[in-house]
Image: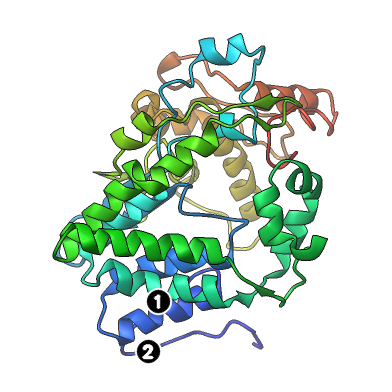
């Protein structure tokens, strides 16, 4: 069989990411004597540079660790909502939904601290050693992937009128970067250089310097810039300008955390995912919905079963996931619950959003999901579009 994705094999090490430069950087770390965790951190920061439309250091990251000599762990790099992001605050602004873009949508940034914890606790390289690849591509440039320019064009007006510093970077001369064109992010390179320099001056030793970098991110020049930016009113999907609720106190109080994974035993395998604060357990629910005897692999019945089970799991995600402490994960993965849910899979495709009632509790859908569900019930594919929920209706 002819394929463009051959089986890759090796005797030294292997790295896989969504961008070749990140994979190449990870392999360079391995070849330089680093371990898998060093390589993962280096690759993560390169992805911030080469795929900026998809992720960044001020975003979030769920990390699953499977060390050879210990239990599987989850490193939660999902920051909480700022302390000031209360229902009362949004109501006082005349909002019944959190805008999907702009400062009000911002959670406490969690990605940087999680990557630093991973490097400190499991890596062997210094901060400067793993950041040098991202610094190099940000400073000297990298070929832009096609979707960067496409994504920027969807928000061109906002870049030109509201996010002018982003326009300077991604619309040089008023033109979005063409696929393969050289794209630089020198302010980011300068940020990492300054952070590394300050961390090295603040402490001696690899682990102490990484902790110093975490403090600088929270409370130093990076944290100050994040809090200052969040406080500036900016246009969002409500059609009005709002300041965010993120403060320096929110940043200073946050730390990424380790936790046990959500797991499900299937067909002799223990499948591990991040908790209900992520959408990871939806895959575990899909496994739990499968009967013991599956239709022939690749058959129409097999595909139908997987798709319809996926819809049921995603409906539960919409109704139940979010605040991990309140997600009834044990009930959602229980045999009885999934046996009952399995009976909803009929011979024809369902067009309904059908969350379940684990432990008899009534499901609750957010405003956007409820609008989409109501539209599906009456056959209106446009329901929910442009409702201000943010991506992908930006």
Q: Is residue 317 left or right of residue 191?
A: right
- Give the number of the disc on residue 10: 2
Closest to the observer, 359 or 302: 359
Q: Residue at x 63, y 42 (%)?
A: 308
**C-beta proximity under 8 Å, tags 2 and 1:** no
The numbered mark, 2 or 1, whose residue comes first in the sequence reads 2
Q: Secondary structure at mark 2?
A: loop
Question: In the image, residue 235 lies at what x, y percent?
Answer: 70, 32
Closest to the observer, 300 or 276: 276
Q: Identify the colour scheme used.
A: rainbow
- Point out the image quarter for the C terminus: top right
Q: Residue at x 77, y 71 (%)?
A: 178
Q: Residue at x 34, y 29 (%)?
A: 249
Question: In the image, residue 337 lies at what x, y percent?
Answer: 44, 28
Residue denoted by label 1:
26
Q: Residue at x 69, y 27 (%)?
A: 241
Q: Secondary structure at mark 1?
A: helix
Question: In the image, residue 63 lies at what x, y percent?
Answer: 36, 54
Question: In the image, residue 112 lies at what x, y percent?
Answer: 38, 52
Q: Is residue 303 left or right of residue 269?
A: right
Q: Is residue 317 visible?
A: yes
- Point out the image quarter for the N terminus: bottom right
Q: CA distance from mark 2 to mark 1?
A: 15 Å
- Give the number of the disc on residue 74: none
Relative to 129, does residue 61 appear above or below in the rendering?
above
Q: Quadrant of residue 116?
A: bottom left
Relative to 141, does residue 62 appear above or below in the rendering?
above
Decide: few, some or many residues near mark 2? Use Cα within 10 Å; few <14, some 14-19, many ≥20.
few
């Amino acid at each position: 069989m002819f394929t463009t994705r051959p089986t890759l094999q090796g005797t030294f090490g292997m790295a896989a990411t969504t961008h070749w430069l990140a994979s190449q950087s990870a392999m360079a770390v391995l070849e330089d004597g680093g371990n898998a965790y060093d390589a993962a951190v280096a690759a993560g920061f390169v992805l911030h540079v080469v795929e900026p439309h998809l992720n960044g250091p001020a975003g979030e990251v769920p990390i699953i660790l499977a060390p050879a000599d210990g239990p599987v762990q989850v490193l939660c790099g999902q920051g909480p909502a700022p302390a000031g992001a209360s229902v009362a605050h949004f109501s006082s602004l005349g909002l019944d939904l959190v805008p999907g873009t702009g400062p009000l949508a911002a959670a406490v940034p969690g990605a940087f601290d999680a990557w630093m914890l991973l490097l400190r606790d499991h890596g062997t390289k210094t901060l400067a050693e793993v950041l040098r690849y991202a610094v190099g591509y940000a400073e000297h440039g990298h070929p832009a992937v096609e979707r960067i320019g496409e994504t920027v064009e969807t928000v061109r007006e906002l870049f030109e009128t509201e996010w002018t510093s982003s326009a300077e970077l991604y619309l040089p001369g008023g033109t979005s970067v063409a696929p393969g064109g050289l794209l630089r992010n020198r302010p980011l390179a300068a940020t990492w250089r300054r952070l590394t320099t300050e961390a090295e001056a603040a402490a001696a030793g690899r682990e102490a310097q990484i902790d110093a970098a975490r403090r600088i991110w929270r409370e130093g020049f990076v944290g100050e810039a994040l809090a200052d930016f969040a406080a500036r009113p900016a246009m969002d999907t409500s059609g009005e300008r709002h300041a965010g609720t993120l403060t320096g106190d929110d940043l200073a109080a946050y730390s990424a955390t380790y936790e046990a994974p959500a797991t499900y035993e299937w067909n002799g395998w223990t499948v591990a995912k991040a908790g209900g604060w992520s959408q990871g357990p939806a895959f575990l629910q899909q496994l739990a919905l499968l009967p013991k005897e599956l239709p022939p692999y690749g058959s129409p019945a097999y595909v139908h079963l997987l798709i319809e089970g996926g819809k049921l799991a995603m409906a539960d995600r919409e109704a139940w996931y979010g605040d991990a402490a309140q997600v009834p994960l044990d009930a959602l993965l229980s045999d009885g619950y999934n046996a009952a849910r399995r009976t909803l899979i009929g011979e024809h495709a369902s067009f309904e959003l059908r969350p379940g009632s684990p432990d008899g509790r009534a499901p609750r859908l957010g405003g956007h999901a409820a609008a989409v569900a109501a539209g599906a019930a009456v056959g209106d594919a446009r329901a929910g579009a442009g409702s201000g929920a943010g991506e992908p209706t930006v």
